[in-house]
Amino acid sequence: MRDAPEDSVISGPKSQTRVQRVISYPAGHEPDFWNPDPESRAHRFVLGNTARASSADPPLIAICMNPSYADHTQADKTVNRLIQASLDNGRPGWVMLNLYPERATDASCLNSYDSGLSAANCAAIEHVLSMYRATEVLGAWGGLKHRTLRSAKTDVLDTLDRLRVRLFMFDGLTGGGEPFHPTPRRAPIQMKGDKRYLARSGNRLVEQIV
């Protein structure tokens, strides 16, 4: 699901197929890393461009909501916004992770929460964070209206806590205490500048005041 609608909706158990307009990646920033490989039309754990990155100089790693239709051959608006943020922040690549890996461009199309799928997603997140020895990750998932996403968020935050990886944002929180999605329905966000770190407060996130 995306806070702002994409140009197409993928087919799935509950979704309706629409005509898909192809969105290209910026030249030189196409994905070179994805999981699963071969790709699945049902779910996606990881998508990124990391050829120039290393543990000493990591990519911009973000946790978004759940994947839409983007894969290694075509982008969507959310992935391209993350790529621009990686350039604006001087990072040598980008990696998109998700709270939940089921593909859907509309949260109403998500299936019921699957603990096994969520556990596999958290394992993929841990693998990426460990690969780059990441100590922090960008939160960028927006409002969570579907209970599947809210359940998955708890799993992901528990994983970050266990790994002692800090969650940060650039642009503030929604009214529900969630970091803004890269393509919100409101005015565009900057996705650059000073990092603002987050802490859990019940089911919400709050900004840590240093």
Image (cartoon, rainbow, N blue to C red):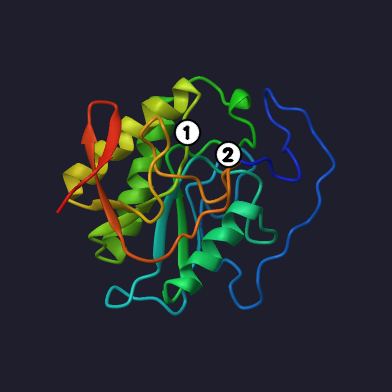
Give the residue drawn at x 26%, y 39%: 206
Residue 22 coordinates in the image, percent (x, y): 78, 56
Tag 2 secondary structure: loop
Residue at position x 40%, y 27% in the image:
150
Name the residue type under label 2. Answer: Asp
Instruction: Name the residue located 82 percent from the left edge and 37 percent from the top edge.
Output: 18
**Residue 187 percent location from the top left of the image:** 58, 48
Task: Specify the label residue 3 is tagged with.
Answer: 2
What is the quadrant of the N terminus in the image?
top right
Mark 1 or mark 2: whose residue is earlier in sequence: 2
Residue 113 seen by the camera: no
Identify which amino acid the numbered label 1 is placed on: Gly
Q: Is residue 110 visible?
A: yes
Quadrant of res 159: top left
Q: Are marks 1 and 2 in contact (CB under 8 Å)?
A: yes
Q: Which residue is the site of mark 1? A: 143
Query: Badge 1 local density, few (<14 within 10 Å), some, or many (20+)?
Result: many
- Where's the C terminus, which quadrant? bottom left
Where residue 7 sits in the image (x, y, percent)? 75, 45
Cα gap from disc 1 to disc 2, whole angstroms: 7 Å
Q: In the picture provided, is 26 more to the left or to the right than 113?
A: right
